[in-house]
Image (cartoon, rainbow, N blue to C red):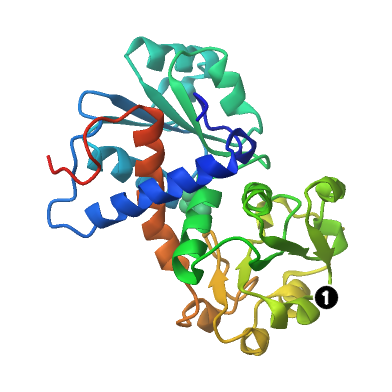
Amino acid sequence: MRKHLLSMHDLTADDVVRILDTAESFREVGTRVIKKVPALRGRTVVNFFLENSTRTRISFELAAKRLSADVINFSAGGSSVAKGESLKDTALTLQAMGADAIVIRHSSSGSPLQLTKWVDAQVLNAGDGTHEHPTQALLDLYTMREKLGRLEGLRVAIVGDVLHSRVARSLSFGLVKMGADVTLVGPPTLIPPEVTAWGVQVSSDIDGVVPKLDVCYMLRVQKERQRLEYFPSVREYARLFGLTRERAAMLPASALIMHPGPMNRGVEIDSEVADLPESVIEEQVTNGIAIRMALLYLMLGGTGTEGETA
Ligand code: CP
């Protein structure tokens, strides 16, 4: 594996299999009474979150703590970033304090790449602007493989606001790399022109796509980034592209319903659909801890067997 994880393009298909297999052994650690192994004892992981997050921030924190690393959680509020300190000076300060790995979330695409130019620490992208969110894609791949037994040949639709979605980009790249058959579904205004190079299909006919799926992956409508020309109203979007009860009933019986969170219940997904047994949204969150443990372990050269207790 490469030194940094900035994009799904940094990983080969073999790397993805190795990460998912390693996560499999860490998944068991989370079921123990004492959920801790000594693999990264003495190493320092900094969670550098300059954009809001619940799932990714907490799961990276838990992952590093379960590996016995020292963990520093850093956000803009309450730090010198709020006084105007630059990203570079903040990064150099974290470096001077001995960070071995920096996990960064930032609203600007490309910030993790920029960080690699300033620090020696290993950098993991926890979501940058509209660019990528590779650890989300890996936990989604893990969940699909765990539930459906394979990735190759899976028919997956990623539905909604692809234009603004770093999750859609990373997940498309990951699924195509692993041999899945991906269809992006949404209004043409929310499908970026560059998808022609992604190796995916595109459709605006959700009712035609849904009955043929193994996985229906709904994206959050990023209300904060919408302009009127993308779609006339949230209500119309929900009617034309939301996963309603009627549409969910058109899915094959074994199909999974997925969402990266946070959800807009009643917009891209009906509230009762989010809570159906076919919905694996909470399992995605649980699997995220094991995936992030696997990544930190593999990237920081963790020692000892994954199953060894502290
Ligand atoms: N899926 C995801 O990235 O969620 P958070 O923004 O809560 O981290």
Task: Name the secondary structure under disc 1.
Answer: loop
Q: Position of residue 55 (x, y in %)?
A: 43, 52
Which quarter of the figure is the C terminus placed in? top left
Question: x and y percent of residue 273 in the render?
Answer: 54, 81
- The quarter holding residue 7 reads top right
Question: Horizontal placement of 232 versus 34: left or right?
Answer: right
Residue 134 percent across, percent down from the top left: 56, 43
Counting the numbered discs, the total is 1
Residue 89 higher or lower than 15, as above or below: above
Residue at image location 67% in from the left, 39% down from the top: 131
Q: Please rate how many residues cluster around mark 1, counting C-alpha atoms within 10 Å: few if below 14, some from 14 to 19, many from 20.
A: few
Q: Which of 47 and 300 is in front in this view?
A: 300
**Which residue is rendered at x = 36% and y = 59% of the image?**
286
Quadrant of the rendered structure where residue 12 is?
top right
Left or right for 244, reference 22: right
Q: Residue at x 36, y 9 (%)?
A: 96
Residue 300 sits above or below residue 94 on the image: below
Q: Is residue 286 visible?
A: yes
Above or below, 159 relative to 255: above
Relative placement, left or right, of 225 versus 303 is right
Residue 28 coordinates in the image, percent (x, y): 25, 56
Q: Is mark 1 within 8 Å of ligand 1?
A: no
Residue 53 visible to the viewer: no
Dot 1 amino acid type: Asp
The residue identified by callout 1 is: 205
